[in-house]
Amino acid sequence: MTVNKTLGRPESLCDVPTLYCGGCGHGVAHRLTAEAIDHFGLRGSAVGIAPAGCSVLLYKYFDIDTIESAHGRALAVGTGMKRANPDLFVLTYQGDGDLASIGMCETIHTANRGESITAVFINNAVYGMTGGQMAPTTLPGQRTTTTPAGRDIAREGAPIKMAEMMAGFDGVAYSERVALYDPRQIRRARKAVFKAFEAQITNSGLGFVEILAPCVTNLKMTPDKAQQWVIDELCATFPLGVYKDRLPTENQATTPAAATQTATAECGSVTHAD
Amino acid sequence: MNATATTAEKRTGTPTLMQGNIALAEGAVQAGLRCYFGYPITPQNQIPEYLSARLPETGGVFVQAESELASINMVLGAAATGARVMTSSSGPGISLMQEGISFLAGDQLPCVIANIMRSGPGLGGIKPTQGDYYQATRGGGHGDYHTLVLAPANAQEMFDLTYKAFDLADTYRNPVLILADAILGQMKEPVIPEPPYPRLELDKDWALTGANNRPARNIRSMYLEGDDQEQHNYVLQEKYDRVRQEVPMWEQMDTDDADFVVVAFGTSARIASSAVRLARAEGLRVGLFRPITLFPLPEEALREMAAKVNGLLVVEMNLGQMVHDVRAILGPDKPVSFHGRPGGGVPTVREILEKIKENMV
């Protein structure tokens, strides 16, 4: 019996083993991002901006130009790149502590300026690389290494909902939250990443996709239990769905940022069909 | 090594009356500045204000960032594409930028940063000061690194040294700091705002331009494998050693027959030069040594000059920073005295003259 490979490796994804833990979402998120780079023919114009955190080694995994960013500053670095050379396709890849805590100021001002950048945001509700401390997206009651009794909203505040917040900025062209817990969700996530790419390609504004992914090591769960936790817990606090879509429709594909909002979603509704 | 000093009188061309901050900004434009990112803070606001109108005329990019943290990281992103790029700030703003400056140094990315110093610590005031000498010359942020530091002393130098800073940044792939103060930034003087020489055009084969028909490039400061991080630091150190050999600039006045020499930079040197003239008028053989580069300090020139004098007086607008470098360079046998005023206090000509007489035995 022979086994046929039906899905090859995307050209812009390097053929190397990653250092990610088994069951971590970064691998799938990297693959979807690389598929989008290939699909839109961006391997020769893309620059990837790696955050502080587990995905700091992005340059090992993507066969595109890459740079490290200081913790939280990826979107400021991206702004500088895109303004200096608008022909580049600027891709940022950040976690929750990076984008929604230390980098929140850079994040919301980049969104507000409507920079033509694609921002991939991995929400796993903890600081992964530093050892599972509380993140701005940690769930109420969730135990972390700095909330040993569980996150108390009265003390630590509530989880920050980035996809919803980003949708509120006029400069954001696309904002969606997706998950990776089954093939159907992965297909949806792929489509969302493609849309976030289209936002930049059509110069419509910031393209934002929030990907819910488990950090199995810091959750101290097996990969299957961690996926169930994403479904039961993470998705309950962070509803999946399209929160903003003002990408140009096909017959106005070249109309930039001023395009009217072509689609909206109510908070929490899953508006995309398979 | 070269002794270099410029004023409008020493240049050919038509002088125009220009404020120091504007001269600095126009020097950057003439050097081919492509992007400026900055955040308002006194006493440097004329730089972003001027560039917000001037840069679009040249096809350049001006962005008012949400903070100095964002500014310096925008600078980093733009520098990584190979563009000539700068920011400017003061005091607390420069402190905020230190994270990014450390990254720029670690990444070996060229850029120019102007610090029109304000007094501190903390919020401080906007009066002229030289309190940031240590921050500027030691690197300022975390890690074992240096920025090149240029200290202009007049409006023409605000133009010329900024123009030169971009060439130095590209040559050494390193951030270059312009260290000035409110007097230099706000004062108007005759300036010939023309390039003194054609600007350097280097092939930036490290820049992130998209991996089109070439292998992908990566810019980083973190090296996790083996002793790569240690080796990276040696690479940086070798570069700083080259900078120490190739870049020192200074000006000497009346030092040839001097028994006693005042050492000062920037505004302090301007004031000290008047004190030296008064001392000469009284028959005292006094000279002035003005470092133009603060990193690297002109160590050899200073040693050579100091060998012929009996003593030196370092004058600074702080309570003693460069003086410790001067003492370290000259050793314990050479008497080096100090006069300084902190927190926006400006030494007077009379004060310096008295200190010269007091220490000139």
Image (cartoon, coloured by chain):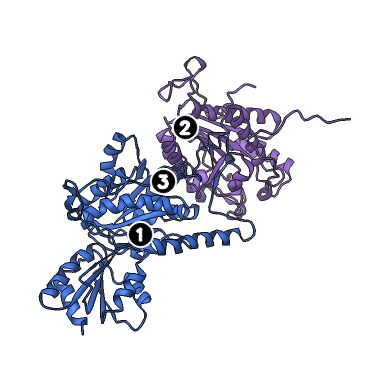
Q: What element carries label 3?
A: helix
Q: Is residue A193 above or below residue B186?
A: above
Q: Do the residues labelled 1 and 2 touch (CB within 8 Å)?
A: no
- Does label 2 lie on the same chain as label 1? no
Tell me which numbered mark, 1 or 3, is placed earlier along the sequence.
Answer: 3
Residue B311, position as x, y percentages in the image: 26, 80
Q: Which amino acid does label 3 sit on?
A: Val
Query: Which chain does tag 3 point to?
Result: B
Q: Which amino acid does label 1 sit on?
A: Val
Q: Is residue A186 above or below residue A97?
A: above
Residue A87's mark? 2
Residue B201, position as x, y percentages in the image: 40, 44
- Report whether A155 appears left or right of B110: right
Residue B348, position as x, y percentages in the image: 16, 69
Which residue corresponds to mark 1? B149
Estimate the spatial distance between the alpha carbons at disc 1 and disc 2, rounded to whole Å.
33 Å
The shade of chain A is purple
Estimate the spatial distance between the alpha carbons at disc 2 and disc 3, rounded to whole Å.
18 Å
Q: Which amino acid does label 2 sit on?
A: Asp
Q: Is residue B187 above or below residue A176?
A: below
Estimate the spatial distance between the alpha carbons at disc 1 and disc 3, rounded to whole Å.
18 Å
Identify the residue at the far right of this view: A1
Which residue corresponds to mark 3? B75
Query: Which chain does tag 2 point to?
Result: A
Other-residue count near label 3 (Cα within 10 Å), few / some / many at <14 / 14–19 / ≥20: many
Residue at x-position 55% and y-position 39%: A121
The count of marks equals 3
Query: Which of the 4 image quarters holds residue A215?
Result: top right
